[in-house]
Amino acid sequence: MVGGGQLARMTHEAGIPLGIKFKLLSDTPQDSAAQVVSEVVIGDYRDLDTLRDFARGCDVITFDHEHVPAEHLAALEADGVVVRPGRSALAHAQDKGVMRAKLDEIGVPSPRHRIVADPADAAAFAAEGDGFPIILKTVRGGYDGKGVWFVRSQADAEDAFKAGVAVLAEEKVDFSRELAANIVRSPHGQAVAYPVVESRQVDGVCDTVIAPAPELDDELAGQAQELALRIAKELDVVGHLAVELFQTRDGRILVNELAMRPHNSGHWTQDGAVTSQFANHVRAVLDLPLGDPRPRAKWTVMCNVLGGDYPDMYQAYLHCMARDPQLKIHMYGKDVKPGRKVGHVNTYGDDLDDVLERARHAADYLRGTIVE
Amino acid sequence: MVGGGQLARMTHEAGIPLGIKFKLLSDTPQDSAAQVVSEVVIGDYRDLDTLRDFARGCDVITFDHEHVPAEHLAALEADGVVVRPGRSALAHAQDKGVMRAKLDEIGVPSPRHRIVADPADAAAFAAEGDGFPIILKTVRGGYDGKGVWFVRSQADAEDAFKAGVAVLAEEKVDFSRELAANIVRSPHGQAVAYPVVESRQVDGVCDTVIAPAPELDDELAGQAQELALRIAKELDVVGHLAVELFQTRDGRILVNELAMRPHNSGHWTQDGAVTSQFANHVRAVLDLPLGDPRPRAKWTVMCNVLGGDYPDMYQAYLHCMARDPQLKIHMYGKDVKPGRKVGHVNTYGDDLDDVLERARHAADYLRGTIVE
């Protein structure tokens, strides 16, 4: 796996019972995954020679993030390295312009959008619809709210163009909530769909995921799952695909983002599903039969743990474990910095209010925003 | 953790979400746990200097097996190393004579027993009770049926004395089945009890574990749990304690063996309990609050996967995953040798017959004793 973040850490964890020999390419030995994996290569994923050396002896290469340059992926594939998901699929997760064009081509509903050249063009895009506000996104390099601008005027639009990356304009969707439809697909086309979840963002960062999405109409849930399965097939995705969706106030679903790797909206599966997204991602990229994606509890809630003002979470960690013996804590081994994702918690049970309260409490307590 | 076997492998797996920095002392880099842990020291646990070097920088030392010499444990404790479970507790898991004497002292029921000096003394022990057959065990070094003899005559008894280790004679208990009462205890005395399980042995090796033990009287189950909690307290055990029990035909329970580490009879907890034995062992030895030991399913069954005649299990592995998407496979990364424990499978559900059949089928198929 290329990339030493928490997704690689949790993928390794899920691969241990499968008997997988996991090799990691990590920026530093301190990275989240590098702390727990036996075979770690320290190197830069932007360097082709490093990638080539790393790939030697791997049956398959997969990714913790979307940032490996497309030309390097092409070179690896030309070398005969098995890359899953492959370069052509990953192009849609690496470039939002490519993604939108493809979704248009296959008839998947997206927010109104087009590439815009400059602030004046962004204003023109706004005028073509309901006017400002609109959303601007750099087509590459954004995540967790970075590379995304909420734009109320032409002057507001200037920042988005400063990086020198193409900018995609999208309508500001009048959504009632965000959903995610997560599926896993294997090279020979087996696929499994997880229940559609509700994802709540704070400041552009995933905060809470509820599985399944409460009061979601069965038909709309089925549509979302079918959409995700269709996208995976049309784009030839192998592994976990997260399709982030807007549920509009008039009852439609529109695709917001795609991620072709384990995803924050699937962390609940570690404790809430028969087979976790990480285990199924491993199974898919190795072309093993996929595991059952069904939930094990009526409700599962995931809350991200963000770093707070205090670097030492240890007392809070003890408190949360003592308060709730059913709490499932997942720490990433990262130094605590304000606002940084350093872990998540999962809770499950029959009573959604209780399950939500327990996860919310633990995440807030660990961050230090509440005491008791 | 000292010892690189599958128990260390699965303890590391369970420690990852807890954010634990896990360090391993392993005989070879090929050992089961050494394949998956970042920080591995290769060395001999029988060498005190190796242990001392290993212990440097560890907050606490725990064990994958009982074989670290007692004098080395004493030396580490004298150095100020935190050893959990401690030397005085471990003495009861390392020496069956010491264990029996202690259980007698605290009034815990055991099979009739005494140390015997030679084959003639073994015959005398038999004559003191109902005659042959009796069981002879070396007080140290036995596991998985090794170091245990089923003895029908004085001549039969000779093998047991060849190792030059003290020999414990025990009555052959007329048991209806074997049970295990597993508990976890932390240094400040918090303890949790898992449901009592039924353990089925084949040729002295654990084959199948059913959680909870079917048709076990609630009162007897409670007695077994209380017994295990009492033993843990009296012996000052920290971490996971497995108490292997005989259920006699006349409705009593007698202690067979103790293990002070994660144990084969607790592997079902990985997929069948809110908190696995491995996670709770880690929490206990680090004096973290313990997790909920309650079952997540009505029935969970574990079957060990033993090596068969074919070294390559890959096709069988694919078949089992495809046949049963709910099957939980746990492979140890070991070379397949006939009769060697190379993994286990867990299944769970509401219908015990179905859950048993699925686990049994997968274990037999992986071993190669059935085809379909």
Image (cartoon, coloured by chain):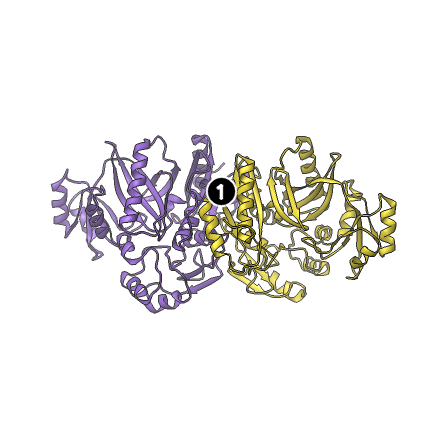
Chain colours: A yellow, B purple
- Specify whether residue B189 is in view: yes
User: Residue A342 is drawn in which quadrant?
Assistant: bottom right
Along the viewing direction, whichever of B135 and B47 lies nearer the viewer: B47
Q: In this view, does A284 lie above or below A314?
A: above
Amino acid at dot 1: Lys
Q: Residue at x 70, y 46 (%)?
A: A236
Pick the residue in front: B55 or A283: B55
Q: In this view, does A369 lie to the left or right of B270?
A: right
Residue in the image at 88% along x and 50% along y: A124
Look at mark 1 in the image and give the residue it sits on.
Answer: B328
Q: Position of residue B237 (x, y in %)?
A: 31, 51
Q: Quadrant of residue A229?
A: top right
Residue found at the far front of this picture? A372
Secondary structure under the numbered disc 1 in the rendered image: strand
Quadrant (top left/top right/bottom left/bottom right) for the N terminus of chain A: bottom right
Mark 1 crowd level (few <14, some 14–19, many ≥20, 10 Å Cα): many
Chain designation of label 1: B
Asked if residue A288 can be seen in this view, the reply is no
**Which of the two residues, B103 or A233, is positioned nearer the viewer here?**
B103
Residue B140 in the image, given as x and y percentages of width and height: 25, 54
| Numbered-mark total | 1
Measuring from the top left, give residue A153's x and y in whole percent: 83, 52
